[in-house]
Image (spheres, rainbow, N blue to C red):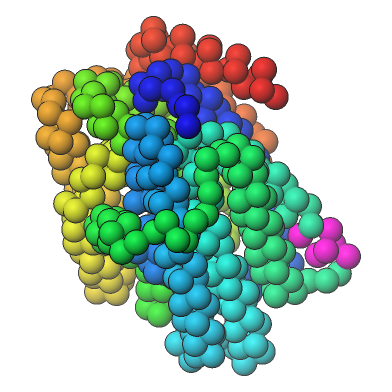
Amino acid sequence: MSVRTPADGYGGRLVTGTGSNLAATAVVFLCSFLLTPFLLEKLGDARYALFVLAQSIVGFSRLLTLGIPASLSRFLSEATARTDERSLIRSFTAGVLLLSVIGAVTALVILLLSAVFPRLFPVEEALAGPARAVLLILGLQVALQMPLLGFQISYQAVQKFHVPSLTRLVGAVVRTMAIFLVFSLGFVKLVLWALLFAATELLQGIYLAVRSRRMIPALRFRPRSVDRTDLRRLLGFSVWVFLGHLGFLLYYNTDYLLIHWFVGPEQVAHYNLAARWDPMLRTVVGSFAALLIPVSASLIAVRDLPEIRRLLDRATRYCLLVALPSCLLLAIFARPFLRAWAGEAYGEAAPAMVALLLPLVLTLSQTPSFSLFVGLGKAKVNGILTVAFAVVNVGLSLYFAVVLRLGLLGIALGTAVTYFVRTGLISPWYVCRITEQPLRPYVTRSILVPIGTALPMIGIAWFLRDRWAPDTLPEILGTMALASIAFIVPAWWTVLREADRAAIRSGMRRILRWS
């Protein structure tokens, strides 16, 4: 099995992987952007909120993976870096076997949950049947995809990030067109939405599994090659990754449950419009972060800590290039944007949207750090801290929302406070400690310089919003694009280094040649 050395051209692969993921995310965002008001109009708040709630519950089933996907990514990357084909096959087979068992358990759990779903989350009697069906469809889709995750993760090990990204792009377009067509023909059913969503997700997983065998001939499934040592090795590291995933789900999926129980079921749809930018932007910066797990695991295998520090610096700055204009401009134009996009009534969610977006800048900047913890085998502390802060988040959200009676804003504030402390204060300190570098230079060059570069954009956006008062979607988006120029132009010179600019030019040439 022949591979490149781990440090060879990772900058170009970072840009190539990022470019393809940005293109896919832009298309996915556009599809979601167009589909959301269409679905709200066709289904209404109650049915739309029911689908969001079902997705949140199904999200908890991903805890059953026990962190195995991230652990598998690390071990496959190490085997690839060492050109150890035997270890690659054993790790891959062990991962697929474990994920297959977990898929079966997930299916059983979903069957049980679907039976009691309307009792746990009271809904109108007419919606009880569709509620069970939607939860069952989405849950079984996740269960069936479990074994396929092992094949999809193999793309990370060989750093072929563009294949899953472009597959996701095609899947989003096909799904959006199918929903528009079916609903426009008069077949407006919540269960149909769930079926179309699940079918396109499964087809993407199957395609990636089939293609992985062509792209990685050494990747073979051999159950007889696996022993208990391989299974224990995967599970031993996965425990701490699992804690990180548990904390992540407590952060994001419990918000909708708390709103349903303590604020009002009708507010779930409003909060979804305010909070959806977090997972969307995480997908974008995930193109940098996902690369850090295999690359850092490869680099640590050859003891190249200085290269890891350079990779962290570059990935952090790249994340802020996306996070700063996206989060800050959406926060400044939150109220008119929500009104123009989804309807006048949804402008009430603007304060919650602002509260979530501002600390999200720091959270996105530290996404590479979280991936680095996994790649370097330092997931224990990160997992414990993530769970601890997630529990605090639930408590603070309830205090702000129920005791102080702040409603949606209270739920958002609980998340925002823990965001800031966890990712703005603790994460930078810990990542500098494990990469053996001083805190102040990293924070200054990788975080504060990009934030300082965004200040002119903030002033111009504020001025344009108050002076022009754009109130239609084209006017708002045009004003945001105009203001973003005040960040993009100086950032090319202040945030990016010469090596970054060269890597971007090289990566764009690769993408054009590939396309």
**Residue 79 horizontal side relative to residue 31, left or right:** left
Task: Give how far across and how far down residue 37 sits, in percent.
Answer: 67, 56
Q: Residue 289's spot in the image, x, y percent?
A: 39, 37
The answer to which of 127 and 458 lies nearer the viewer is: 127
Where, by quadrant of the figure, is residue 479 drawn? Answer: top right
Q: Quadrant of residue 398?
A: bottom left
Dominant SS of magenta comes to helix
Coordinates of residue 159 in the picture (x, y in percent): 48, 33
User: Which region shows up in magenta?
Assistant: 179-185
Asked if residue 52 is positioned above or below residue 15 in the image, the reply reads below
Residue 128, image x, y percentages: 61, 88
The number of callouts visible is 0
Q: Is residue 197 visible?
A: no
Q: Is residue 422 magenta?
A: no
Q: Nearer the viewer, residue 221 or 120?
A: 221
Tell me which residue sits at (12%, 28%) in the image.
436
Image vertical order of residue 447 relative to residue 507, above or below: below
Image: 446 above or below 34 = above
Q: Residue at x 41, y 52 (%)?
A: 90
Residue 111 vs 389, above or below: the answer is below
Task: Say whether residue 160 is left or right of residue 497.
Answer: right
Between 431 and 179, the residue placed more toward the observer is 431
Residue at point 54%, 84% (across, down): 111
> Which quadrant does the C terminus fall into?
top right
Judge whether residue 228 can be spotted in this image. Answer: yes
Task: Using residue 2 as the reference point, say whether residue 227 is left or right of it.
Answer: left
Give the farthest residue toward the front: 224
- Left or right, 357 with respect to 390, comes to right
Residue at 45% of width from left, 11% of height from top?
Answer: 501
